[in-house]
Amino acid sequence: MKDQQINLPYFDVLLTLLDSGHPEIDLAFGRHVHWGYWSNPEQALNTPEDFSKAAEQLSCEVYSAANVKNGQSVLDVGCGFGGTIASLNEQFLGMNLVGLNIDERQLEKARKKVVPQNGNTLRFEQGNACALPFPDQSFDVVLAVECIFHFPDRQQFFQEAFRVLKPGGHLSLSDFVPIAWFLPFMRLFNSKSSNPGFYGNFDLQYTAKRYRKLAAKTGFEQLLERNITVNTLPTYKFLWTLKQDFKLEDFSAFSQTSIIALISQLELLRYMIFSFLKK
Ligand SMILES: C[S@@+](CC[C@H](N)C(=O)[O-])C[C@H]1O[C@@H](n2cnc3c(N)ncnc32)[C@H](O)[C@@H]1O
């Protein structure tokens, strides 16, 4: 996909900040670009160090749900700057690790940062989550950490994940999931226009029930549906601190993040981890 078709303003801002050398931004978002997970949210410290540990933990929570083991082939779809691949590379031995992203600029950073260790092989490839450039049955695990809401079509992604997984393989992902009665209000917030805001095109209309149906339709058995909203909430306080420290005045960044923060605090939008098995 050509660069002009990629519209992710938050990554444009992030890449500019990272390239101008801000250590706090590098610590917070130079590895993972997702929310944090705090086992004890009341003990969150609201510092870049603490946030980076929480972001690392969120990746661990998602790949633990896929039952990752030494010696496996793992595909991380929408891999950002390669943080989840980096974490797997540090924690496991003899792995075949592949990160896929639509945005070549992020992949360039990932290739520079993540060096194989522990007898692992790794590579980062450009491509679309809904047309995976890999043969059938080539992975034990497929991951999609906090990115499925950007993909053009969840069903196509599930079909592709099913195709590239070996029998017995796991798909594990995290997503923002509205509760059923709030869905009509989410429709107002969804962004699929020629001029989307700070977070680009996204679709936050997939309820837990729709995930269950999608799994059944595409041949997966659902193994896990875990609500971790409360563990992610300190993320918002940290984002407000960054906004003030870096004088980030973009109105759509502020308004979109405020809405997500509010409806997450009210548990109308849940942060969830799902895991599925290809039998
Ligand atoms: C919120 S970031 C998460 C990045 C990474 N998973 C992480 O947790 O650090 C969303 C990612 O999805 C990627 N993305 C968006 N649409 C995509 C698509 N159609 N195919 C592959 N990756 C995509 C973006 O480029 C970005 O890296």
Image (cartoon, rainbow, N blue to C red):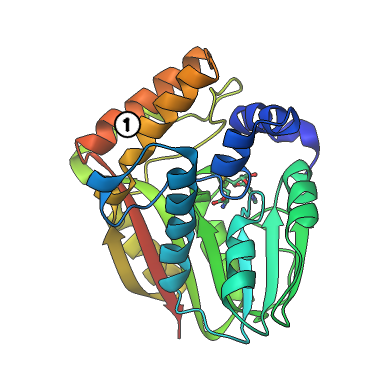
Q: Secondary structure at mark 1?
A: helix
261 with respect to 74 (left or right): left
Three-letter amino acid code at disc 1? Ala
Q: Which residue is mark 1?
A: 261
Instruction: Give the mark count.
Output: 1
- In the image, residue 263 above or below residue 174: above
Q: Residue at x 54, y 50 (%)?
A: 153
Q: Position of residue 163 (x, y in %)?
A: 61, 74
Q: Position of residue 209 (x, y in %)?
A: 28, 57
Which image quadrant for residue 71? bottom right
**From the image, which quarter does the C terminus lie in?**
bottom left
Which image quadrant for residue 130? bottom right
- In the image, residue 192 above or below residue 247: below
- For label 1, the crowd category at 10 Å Cα-Cα, with few meaning under 14, some 14 to 19 and many 20 or more, is some
8 with respect to 265 (left or right): right
Q: Position of residue 121 (x, y in %)?
A: 76, 76
Q: Position of residue 68 (x, y in %)?
A: 51, 79
Q: Is mark 1 within 8 Å of ligand 1?
A: no
Q: Residue at x 33, y 52 (%)?
A: 38
Residue sitting nearer the eye, 126 or 193 = 126
Observer able to see residue 243? yes
106 with respect to 75 (left or right): right
**From the image, which quarter does the N terminus lie in?**
top right
Q: Residue at x 26, y 33 (%)?
A: 263
Q: Residue at x 74, y 27 (%)?
A: 20
Observer able to see residue 35? no
- In the image, residue 105 above or below residue 70: above
2 with respect to 76 (left or right): right
Residue sitting nearer the eye, 196 or 257 = 257
Residue sitting nearer the eye, 60 or 192 = 60
